């Protein structure tokens, strides 16, 4: 009889431990029916409408194509910063930022180049690949409009993908006007020259990631 009582007592203890292990841990303070549910955030996505780079003749109105900003399938209202002075030649950046309900932001930007190219430069075409003499790296020029170029790797740096807008406003003059480059860094140029006779150019890149040396290139 005693053995039977001991066996029953042991079974009760085991069942008690089993039931207690299935109960919610009081310190978790879960609401009823919400045990173990994690919070999920959907990050915003901001997508440009139209081109990333817009080129305008000085004095032409700028119509912003805008962006699409979504949190999942829900539309968000983007905050737009930056402006374009269409009466002053230069390179401008418009930034679009959207924030989801949990406070996480996402942003994208657009470059607007306002140009005022003189007649003596309008027919120039400096497009092509140029090799930097000191290290063999290549800068690639693409003509976007009369006197306006997109240049990838303007410093001829190893492994660089930086791109900038370059103006050829008159004659063979070239210049990287002050701008936010493709990586967002403030960039401009100094000591620029371009030779039609040798299809070559040189300049100093003013950018936090570049030194003060003169960089010289020859067209391939």
Image (cartoon, rainbow, N blue to C red):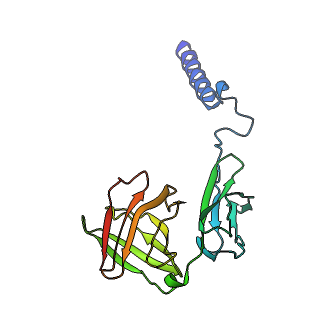
Pick whichever, 153 or 67, lies toward us.
Answer: 153
Residue at 38% from the left image edge and 70% from the top image edge? 193
Q: In the image, what residue occupies the spot 61% across and 63% down?
A: 92
Quadrant, the N terminus = top right
Q: Nearer the viewer, residue 61 or 64?
A: 61
Question: Is residue 209 depicted above or below 13 in this figure?
Answer: below
Percent across and percent down for residue 132 are 29, 68
Q: Is residue 47 visible?
A: yes
Position of residue 60 measured from the top left corner of the image (x, y, whole percent): 70, 76
Instruction: Using the image, determine if residue 188 lies above or below residue 57.
Output: above
**Does residue 153 show up?**
no
Q: Residue at x 43, y 77 (%)?
A: 172
- Name the quadrant containing residue 119: bottom right
| Left or right of 174, for residue 69 | right
Horizontally, is 136 left or right of 15 in the view?
left
Location of residue 177 in the rendering, given as x and y in whole percent from the top left corner? 52, 64
Q: Measured along the vertical axis of the image, is residue 104 above or below residue 50?
A: above
The C terminus lies in which quarter of the figure? bottom left
Determine the residue located farthest toward the bottom in the rendered image.
123
**In the rendered picture of this protein, how many numbered marks are placed on residues?**
0
Q: Where does residue 170 sit, x and y in percent of width and height? A: 50, 77
């Amino acid at each position: 009889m005693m053995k039977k009582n001991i066996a029953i007592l042991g079974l009760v203890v085991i069942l008690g431990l089993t039931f207690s292990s299935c109960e919610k841990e009081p310190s978790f303070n879960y609401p009823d029916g919400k045990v173990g549910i994690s919070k999920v955030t959907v990050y915003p996505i901001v997508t440009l409408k139209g081109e990333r780079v817009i080129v305008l003749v000085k004095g032409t109105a700028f119509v912003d194509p805008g962006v699409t900003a979504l949190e999942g399938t829900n539309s968000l209202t983007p905050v737009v910063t930056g402006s374009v002075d269409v009466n002053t030649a230069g390179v401008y950046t418009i930034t679009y930022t959207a924030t989801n309900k949990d406070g996480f932001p996402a942003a994208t930007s657009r470059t607007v180049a306002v140009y005022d190219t003189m007649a003596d430069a309008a027919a120039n075409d400096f497009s092509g690949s140029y090799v930097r003499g000191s290290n063999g790296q290549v800068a690639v020029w693409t003509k976007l409009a009369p006197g306006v170029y997109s240049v990838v790797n303007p410093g001829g740096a190893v492994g660089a993908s930086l791109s900038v807008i370059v103006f050829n406003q008159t004659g063979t003059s070239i210049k990287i006007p002050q701008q936010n480059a493709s990586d967002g860094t403030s960039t401009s140029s100094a000591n620029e020259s371009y030779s039609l006779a040798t299809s070559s150019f040189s300049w100093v890149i003013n950018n936090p990631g570049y030194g003060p040396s003169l960089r010289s290139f020859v067209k391939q």
